[in-house]
């Protein structure tokens, strides 16, 4: 049985880490290398770097950025953005990425998935898709320009698996940055058709959202982006809730996630002034004469 993973997402636009809302509004965060270092230290199982600029402007991957982030983190690193051919994917891995996600160029030419999987192995290739729900509850795949792709999400999942994708990334565009939870209906629908691990992305706003999505059969990883910027100790709170629900988490960290240290509002309790003083100063025992 695969253990659940918590994947910290770094969206990069014009070289900066950003928060995204619907992939059309962006708020700057800062240096993506520093963001990655913090996510690693906070206990992310994996880090997923998504270069929006490379994807939308047709540029190739930012190999220098991949190298810099890989040098500061020691968990698996996934990369998405501007993978145009197998050579781009190979170089991204050489610079430090463990996996590459292919989205737009796989829509245009699905053979790219097979070509990349032959060289890097299926485990290193993620078939990604951006999905939007309309008012009737129907789902469509959108390309980088917002146009509707000819295949339905169900058909596209079958195609990605046929060509050798080792994982599937399902991104709910209309949930991005809304903090109202993952699209559970969509993920239940598509996870049934998946024979490889599914990564859910788009909508995480609080720990219960992550617990809900990981409870779906076939969903093995939750990708979390904005929530890690909005809420302090987010990964701690998520792990604490998941362990309470007996979820099987991948990383076995030497940290206690006992919820007794949380307040009624679900935040970490503040240490008392007395305990802080004890931690700050050494108080030797009185000398005996």
Image: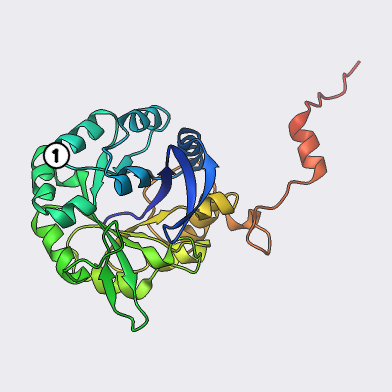
Q: Residue at x 77, y 41 (%)?
A: 275
Assign the C terminus to one quadrant of the image: top right
Determine the image quadrant of residue 199.
bottom left
The residue drawn where x is 66% and y is 63% is: 265
Q: Nearer the viewer, residue 26 or 114?
A: 26
> Residue 180 placed where, x, y %?
49, 69
Quadrant in which the N terminus appears? bottom left
Residue under pointer 1: 86
Residue 196 coordinates in the image, percent (x, y) = 19, 58
Q: Position of residue 241 (x, y in %)?
A: 51, 60
Q: Is residue 3 above or below residue 273?
A: below
Q: How is the image coloured?
A: rainbow
Q: Is residue 257 visible?
A: no
**Above or below for 199 versus 216:** above
Q: In the picture provided, is 27 more to the left or to the right than 95? A: right
Q: Residue furthest top?
A: 289
| Residue at x 47%, y 42% (from the top left corner) | 17
Q: Residue furthest bottom?
A: 136
Q: Residue at x 30, y 73 (%)?
A: 188
Please tell me how crowded label 1 is: few (under 14), some (14-19), or many (20+) other residues with Cα within 10 Å.
Answer: some
Residue at far right of view: 289
Which of these two is toward me, 130 or 36?
130
Numbered disc 1: secondary structure: helix
**Horizontal side, residue 272 vs residue 251: left or right:** right
> Residue 110, relative to residue 146: is it above or below?
above
Q: Is residue 113 visible?
A: yes
Instruction: Residue 54: name its quadrant.
Output: top left
- Count of residue discs: 1
User: Residue 77 placed where, x, y %?
Assistant: 33, 39
């Amino acid at each position: 049985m695969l253990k659940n993973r918590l994947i910290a997402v770094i969206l990069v636009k014009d070289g900066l880490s950003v928060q995204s809302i619907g992939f059309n509004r962006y708020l700057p965060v800062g240096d993506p290398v520093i963001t990655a270092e913090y996510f690693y230290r906070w206990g992310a199982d994996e880090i997923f770097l998504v270069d929006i600029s490379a994807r939308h402007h047709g540029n190739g991957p930012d190999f220098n950025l991949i190298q810099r982030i890989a040098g500061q983190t020691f968990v698996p690193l996934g990369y998405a953005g501007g993978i145009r051919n197998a050579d781009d994917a190979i170089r991204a891995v050489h610079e430090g990425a463990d996996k590459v996600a292919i989205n737009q160029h796989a829509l245009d030419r699905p053979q790219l998935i097979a070509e990349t999987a032959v060289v890097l192995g299926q485990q290193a290739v993620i078939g990604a898709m951006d999905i939007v729900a309309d008012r009737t509850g129907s789902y469509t795949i959108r390309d980088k320009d917002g146009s509707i792709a000819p295949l339905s999400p169900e058909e596209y999942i079958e195609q990605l698996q046929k060509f050798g994708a080792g994982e599937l990334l399902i991104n709910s565009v209309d949930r991005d940055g809304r903090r109202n939870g993952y699209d559970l209906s969509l993920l239940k629908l598509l996870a049934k058709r998946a024979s490889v691990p599914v990564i859910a992305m788009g909508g995480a706003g609080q720990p219960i959202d992550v617990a809900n999505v990981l409870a779906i059969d076939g969903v093995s990883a939750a990708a979390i982006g904005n929530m890690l910027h909005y809420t302090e100790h987010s990964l701690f709170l998520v792990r604490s809730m998941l362990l309470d629900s007996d979820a099987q988490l991948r990383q076995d960290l030497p940290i206690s996630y006992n919820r007794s240290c949380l307040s009624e509002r679900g935040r970490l309790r503040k240490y008392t002034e007395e305990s802080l003083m004890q931690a700050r100063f050494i108080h030797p025992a009185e000398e005996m004469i």
